[in-house]
Structure formats: structure tokens, C-alpha cells
Amino acid sequence: QTVVTQEPSLTVSPGGTVTLTCASSTGAVTSGYYPNWFQQKPGQAPRALIYSTSNKHSWTPARFSGSLLGGKAALTLSGVQPEDEAEYYCLLYYGGARVFGGGTKLTVL
Amino acid sequence: EVQLVESGGGLVKPGGSLRLSCAASGFTFSSYSMNWVRQAPGKGLEWVSSISSSSSYIYYADSVKGRFTISRDNAKNSLYLQMNSLRAEDTAVYYCARDDLPTVTTSWGQGTLVTVSS
């Protein structure tokens, strides 16, 4: 069974920069896993942020960026805002199947 | 505006069945692959199943394979999830989600809660 691992929690100060990562139990994450990133706030449905590693949706704030870093997918928030406090999930594609990471709870403090 | 509205959730006993629906509007439903994703209370997201635009390709998570069946009716702009042999661990909010491309999951509904309990 494939497991996708994210940091359970991270804390960042307003205006700061933080990087969330997404690792696969099958080995290094490459662009061929088409990493997607989603933001979810309490009581809300997830919202898509990043697709295919680094591509932003039209509504994605410029401070969010995606990349590959040390064999993992990464989501970097630069100039963090209080409203960025949320749970963040990565999604990797394994042929027809997909696996979500366990999520990272980002606290802005 | 893309709208996805799930329905059909509720309380069901272990071993029972339930059929979820997702009504789509605001886009050409027959052109897009669709998915079911669930979230147990206080837990993370879990991909459940995907179906291609013409139903040619269907995939399931191992946790539901053989118990759940995804289907769609493009004439009715609707996605379905037939859930049989339900277990307590199937308790979750079930979301339908649209793929803009095969590897780009973009739009989500608000979810419907399924509770499996005696």
C-alpha cells in the first residue's frame, strides 16, 4: 500500500516563509506523479491551489508556489498571511490510482 | 459557474447500502472525469474512486474495491457512488470532485455525510 507523507504540523509567523513537503513511499517524487496541492479550512471543502508540480490555478495567490525538492513535492508560502492558516494536502497520481498525503496543519502565529 | 451538489448521505447500519449522487451544473459534464473523495471526521482526505468522461476508465481505492461502484449518467449530468457492505470505517463526508485534466483535480462539491453505525 502506497503511503504519501506530509509534515503533521508547521508553524510560521505572519510575513514569513514556510515550505511543506510531500513524500512517496515508492521513492522520489517526480513530475510524473503530477503533484497537486489543496487547502482546506475548517468546515469547508478543499480548494485546489497547485497542479502538475508548480502550476497555479487562476485563483491561487502569488505567494503560493510548488516545486520538487530533494525527492519530494513541495509547497512554499512566501509572505504568509493570517488567512493562510489551514490544512494543506498533497495528491499524487499513480497511474489510475491517486493517494492523498495525510495533511499538514499550518498555524500562523 | 461550476456547481457540484452531493446528496444521498445519511445514517446506515453496518452491512447496509447507500447510493450517493452528485448533480453537476455550469459546465459540460460529459467532457470531464469525475471523482469521489472522502474525509472521516477529524481526519484527512482519502481518494475513493474515479471515472472517465465516457465511463471507459474506472479506478477504486483498495479500501473500497469490490464494495463500492462508481457510475455516471451524462444525460442527467450526474455522478453516483453505490456503496454496499458498509463498515464503520466508511463513515465520512463524501465529496465529488471534477478533473479539469486527468491529473488536475479542481472543483469540489460541499460534501454529504455518511454515518455507518448500529
Image (cartoon, coloured by chain):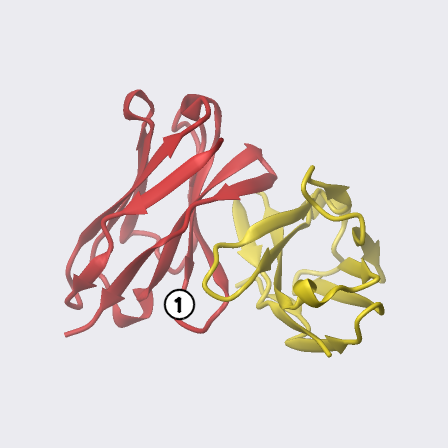
Chain colours: A yellow, B red
**Total label count?**
1
| Residue at 17% from the left image edge and 55% from the top image edge | B17
Question: Depth check: B80 or A64 in front?
Answer: A64
Q: Name the element at disc 1.
A: loop
Q: Is residue B76 left or right of residue A45?
A: left
Q: Is residue B35 left or right of residue A48?
A: left
Q: Is residue B67 above or below residue B5?
A: below
| Residue at 76% from the left image edge and 45% from the top image edge | A31
| Residue at 19% from the left image edge and 72% from the top image edge | B117
Task: Tell me the kind of residue under disc 1.
Answer: Ala
Residue A54 x %, y %: 77, 45
Q: Is residue B58 above or below residue B12?
A: above
Residue position for label 1:
B40
Write down the chain letter for disc 1: B
Judge whether residue A71 can be spotted in this image. no
| Residue at 44% from the left image edge and 32% from the top image edge | B57
Q: Quadrant of residue B53?
A: top left
* Image quarter hosting the C terminus of chain B: bottom left
Residue A30 x %, y %: 76, 50
Q: Is residue A72 left or right of residue B47?
A: right
Q: Is residue B85 left or right of residue B43?
A: left
Q: Residues within 10 Å of mark 1 (few under 14, many from 20)?
A: some
Judge whether residue B16 can be spotted in this image. yes
Residue B56 x %, y %: 41, 27
Residue B40 x %, y %: 39, 67
